Image: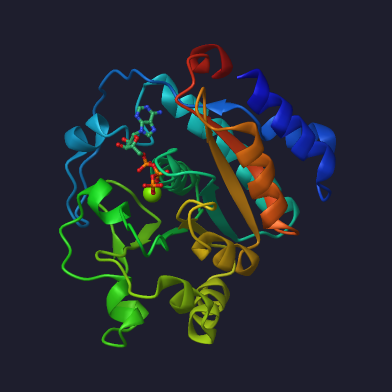
């Protein structure tokens, strides 16, 4: 873990836009490995199986597991910065595959939407291996791939989910061919800008693919106001974190999530 801490420390020193203490506050928001189940309010939106979601470590806003505290910390830090710096489009990024981006994006979105009056739109822009809808188990038959194919309007594709007010999901169900080009095209830029302008108070949380495996994430990142970087305890390599930060260039990193942390219980307080 020391190596990652050092890399993050280095990143903090290298970056500008936020104060040392501000940046430090966002670091090491850890996610627990073990959870205890808790009840969840049912609603009338697109149905999801909360028991199943708990198994997948999706954390409902009123859950009692300590992971909720970690996500609340992340939410608070993200909200403070988003409001202080007028940021509304936030990507979730990592160096390598399987570091917990999708899980973080979903739990962050759920946590933000639990904030009174805070609308959230969760967008799946991992066009190679989209998994927001699958992870949430949404009973949908099409998503953004239809928009990219020109067969659906954005308004036809977003959905609310059961048990959560103020959260909408813009899913991608199947991989989009030539994803990098699709993300770089003017229409995609306009779509993101339009989603941002439609509801200026709403936060857009964008699930992205791994930054070092293809250029998709780095194509989208400059179109966003900031990103949250997910690193995995004991797995993410320091040089990969440094490389991602280097590649992100001027894109702001407003928080770092230390996923699969064994120290999360202590850090949750
Ligand atoms: N803190 C955690 N504890 C246990 N399992 C986890 C944790 N975070 C993620 N996982 C599991 O690891 C797998 C990968 O997580 P996730 O899909 O969120 O990663 P990802 O970074 O989005 O992956 P990809 O790069 O493929 O998009 C999932 O099965 C998820 O349930
Ligand atoms: Mg993912």
The answer to whether one can see residue 40 in this image is: no
| Tally of numbered discs | 0
x%, y% of residue 240? Answer: 61, 40
- Whether residue 72 sits left or right of residue 19 in the image: it is left
Quadrant location of the N terminus in the rendered image: top right
Quadrant location of the C terminus in the rendered image: top right
x%, y% of residue 93? Answer: 53, 49
Q: Residue at x 39, y 75 (%)?
A: 178
- Whether residue 248 sits left or right of residue 58 in the image: it is right
The answer to whether one can see residue 32 in this image is: yes
Q: Is residue 172 above or below residue 146?
A: above
x%, y% of residue 191? Answer: 49, 79
Of 35 and 40, nearer the camera is 35
x%, y% of residue 109? Answer: 44, 48
Q: Is residue 31 above or below residue 150?
A: above
Q: Is residue 208 above or below residue 107?
A: below
- Whether residue 109 sits left or right of residue 257 in the image: it is left
Q: Is residue 119 above or below residue 4?
A: below
Q: Residue at x 63, y 40 (%)?
A: 241
Q: Can you tell which quarter of the image residue 140 is in? A: bottom left
Please name the colour scheme applied to the rendered image: rainbow
Where is ligand 1, by quadrant? top left
């Amino acid at each position: 873990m020391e190596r990652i801490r050092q890399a993050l420390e280095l990143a903090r020193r290298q970056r500008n836009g936020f104060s040392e203490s501000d940046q430090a506050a966002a670091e090491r928001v850890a996610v627990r490995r073990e959870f205890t189940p808790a009840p969840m309010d049912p609603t009338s939106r697109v149905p999801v199986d909360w028991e199943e979601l708990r198994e997948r470590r999706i954390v409902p806003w009123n859950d009692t597991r300590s992971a909720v505290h970690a996500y609340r910390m992340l939410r608070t830090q993200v909200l403070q910065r988003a409001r202080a710096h007028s940021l509304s489009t936030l990507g979730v990024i990592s160096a390598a595959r399987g570091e917990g981006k999708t899980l973080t994006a979903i739990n962050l979105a759920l946590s933000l939407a639990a904030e009174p009056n805070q609308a959230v739109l969760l967008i799946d822009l991992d066009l190679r291996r989209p998994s927001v809808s699958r992870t949430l188990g949404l009973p949908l038959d099409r998503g953004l791939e239809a928009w990219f194919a020109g067969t659906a309007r954005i308004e036809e594709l977003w959905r609310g989910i059961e048990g959560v007010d103020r959260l909408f999901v813009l899913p991608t169900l199947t991989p989009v061919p030539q994803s990098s080009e699709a993300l770089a095209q003017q229409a995609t830029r306009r779509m993101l800008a339009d989603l941002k302008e439609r509801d200026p108070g709403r936060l857009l949380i964008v699930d992205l693919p791994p930054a070092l495996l293809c250029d998709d994430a780095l194509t989208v990142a400059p179109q966003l106001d900031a990103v949250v970087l997910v690193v995995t305890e004991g797995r993410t390599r320091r040089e990969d974190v440094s490389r991602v930060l280097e590649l992100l260039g001027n894109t702001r990193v407003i928080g770092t999530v230390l996923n699969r942390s064994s120290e999360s219980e202590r850090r949750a307080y």
